[in-house]
Image (cartoon, coloured by chain):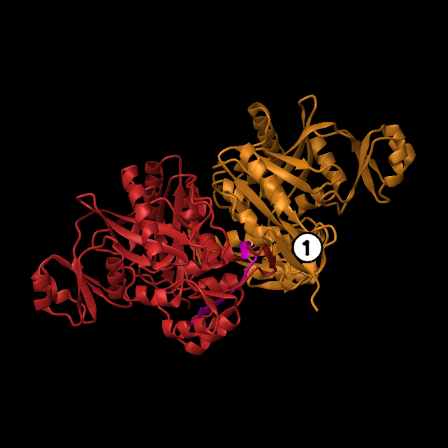
Chain colours: A orange, B red
Amino acid sequence: MKDSFPFPVARIGVIGGGQLGRMMVKAAKRLGCTCVVLDPYPGSPAGQVAGHQIIGGYHDPAKLRELAESCDVVTYELENTDTETLRQLELEGNKINPAPGLLSILQDKLTQKQFLKDAGIPTSEFVEMAEASLADCEAFGFPLVQKARRGGYDGRGVAVMMDAAAFSSHLPVASLIERFVEAEKELAVMVARNADGDCVAYPTVEMCFRAGENVLDLLLCPAKVDPAIAQQAEDLAIRTIQAFDGVGVFGVEMFLSREGELLVNEIAPRTHNSGHHTIEACVTDQFEQHLRAVLDLPLGSTELLAPAAMINLLGAPDAAGRPVIKGMSEALAIPGVCLHLYGKAEVKPFRKMGHVTVIDQDLESARRKAEQVRDLIEISGEQHP
Amino acid sequence: MKDSFPFPVARIGVIGGGQLGRMMVKAAKRLGCTCVVLDPYPGSPAGQVAGHQIIGGYHDPAKLRELAESCDVVTYELENTDTETLRQLELEGNKINPAPGLLSILQDKLTQKQFLKDAGIPTSEFVEMAEASLADCEAFGFPLVQKARRGGYDGRGVAVMMDAAAFSSHLPVASLIERFVEAEKELAVMVARNADGDCVAYPTVEMCFRAGENVLDLLLCPAKVDPAIAQQAEDLAIRTIQAFDGVGVFGVEMFLSREGELLVNEIAPRTHNSGHHTIEACVTDQFEQHLRAVLDLPLGSTELLAPAAMINLLGAPDAAGRPVIKGMSEALAIPGVCLHLYGKAEVKPFRKMGHVTVIDQDLESARRKAEQVRDLIEISGEQHP
């Protein structure tokens, strides 16, 4: 293996300028890399730390080309980009990880499910539903979940139908329908794989959602499950990413059914909200790990140093304008509270403005503190005169 | 206490654009702050992540004023700045931490020693030596250490004289001479204190130097000393910073004499090389802690999560030009290796180009790995055509 690097070690192009990109850029600089961020909004969270941003859309072929041609490797912090252009750029010899072909499979929830099924990865039963149809739903049977094939995120693009009456909430788009899983818990495993095929999993985490909301409310690491289940989840996540030949970091979301069965729900071909705690709680964080993977460097240790609980800091339901953060000082007074604000200059209702990881001696104490912080910090907005 | 912050939480002016500033800027952004860096070299390590750099000297009154007037609080990552201008800016109502008056005492090693002595802090015996004089040295008695009053750094500005014959190596500047301490070990304690007077210490570290060199070679945390000694060192460090009414993070370097006595050697009014391991090994790292202190926020936990060993990555003895990093991949393959490169575009002999912290289950294993990395990684240079 070549083991001599000039400075910069690599020039990394990042599609997307949000918080995931921001944390990736910080890790990249630590590894001696420089970064260029592609994002339509000047002063994006990632652009603020990269020092170099191309202002342009994630689907703009010319801007994607500009990004690829100014970098040694292109990666992304979001799925919602133009895989056709990326495939063309890859054919021309540009290094892009995870591979555009894989991204294209994962972008479409139907092809993603089909791939999982073909690879023998346990996942809930599903059928395509090209146009929303009550008859199709009835034929499949309730309760079910309708998922838009494209563009879903943080619960958008998902309609849960417990019975036929709920069909009125259907999404009027190309979709699939899948069996509703009575989940005991929702788990997630971050997996990293490099081009050599080395593949490592982070400790299984447990994701808690508030009733009726799909944005992650509280994350616990390690998950409060039997250690054998956690191990099975990690093995399954590794098997899944190996099946995809993925290169990079991937978030593998799973259901643990009431019967104790693990079903892969969705795969994110990128760093993930359910891996934020790795910054403080693990030896190598998910962002550095992603870069190690896409740069063909050896993967780092995923060992957990301390139990962790993580919450997102969302904009208040009526927030607008310049962010105002209340309760920050009181929250920082709690030992083990690690605050991450994303540098977003405008707050919107439920917008992800930051997150807090609490590390502590034991998980219950970390969880209590995280819940306390969730009650303390409020991010509202103020209008400029 | 006011507990409502707009975004940005604060605009922080950082005098000095080196690696300490770089790591501080990263922490600042996490806390929702923006940064302006003052440094004479465009593209400085800190400027690369701050996104805003004023190009100017640390002693340039107009540039210091520009910095202060564009920020809510001014701090520094180096001692070598113009305290007269900073004092004037402070009088005009600009917030500057640590206070310029304190910086001015600490900049001059003679006034620093005098302050320690007056405060009853144990430190080695010393006298002023306005001009280097063999007679003065003989009157004081050998072995002794001559220290330049100003401008010393990483062992520069220090002459050790074991006997009168060594007087030929004296520094021809205003200085002090102090008793040479037969140190069993050199220890350091990072201390943080905020304006409310809250004061916390990090676990005592042990600094190992290579014979004949004064740049830190290997740092171990926790220090391999009796826990009672470590506790005494932490207490002494807190007492020292309390005596100075310091606000910010301070490095307190000490000798542990062969007789088991702790003597304060020097105080750095800033984040310090001996606190780099806190990024991975402690709950709150020294850079965030410094910002919490200077922003009047509650201090964070200094708890150690895992034993750590840290080495500096220095430019090779003959290095020049664009950095070339050899052995990086092999080093990253060792579990627990956390690499930090500083983004310096030019390597020079012994220039600090980065550091590596190794965290592991036990200190000896971390130390062995750190020594292995020290042997693996070489940073040489190549000339551009």
Q: Is residue B128 left or right of residue B61?
A: left
Q: In which quarter of the image is residue A251?
A: top right
Q: Does the magenta stretch include residue B206?
A: no
Front-lying residue, A384 or A168: A384
Q: Is residue B36 magenta?
A: yes
Q: Where is residue A384 in the image (x, y as percent from the top left)?
A: 69, 66
Residue at 24% x, 61% y is B113
Front-lying residue, A130 or A215: A215
Work out whether A301 lies above or below A35: above
Residue behind mark 1: A380
Residue A10 appears in the picture as rendered: no
Q: Where is residue B214 in the image (x, y as percent from the top left)?
A: 25, 56
Front-lying residue, B91 or A290: B91
Q: In which quarter of the image is residue B78?
A: bottom left
Residue B123 appears in the picture as rendered: yes
Work out whether A24 lies above or below B319: above
Q: Is residue A23 left or right of residue A163?
A: left
Q: Is mark 1 on a helix, strand or loop?
A: strand
Which contiguous range is marked in magenta?
Answer: B29-40
Residue at 57% x, 50% y is A340
Q: How many marks do you count on the picture?
A: 1
Q: Which residue lies furthest to the right in this view?
A: A135
Residue at 89% x, 39% y is A168
Q: Is residue B331 left or right of residue B262?
A: right
Q: Position of residue B46 (x, y in %)?
A: 46, 62
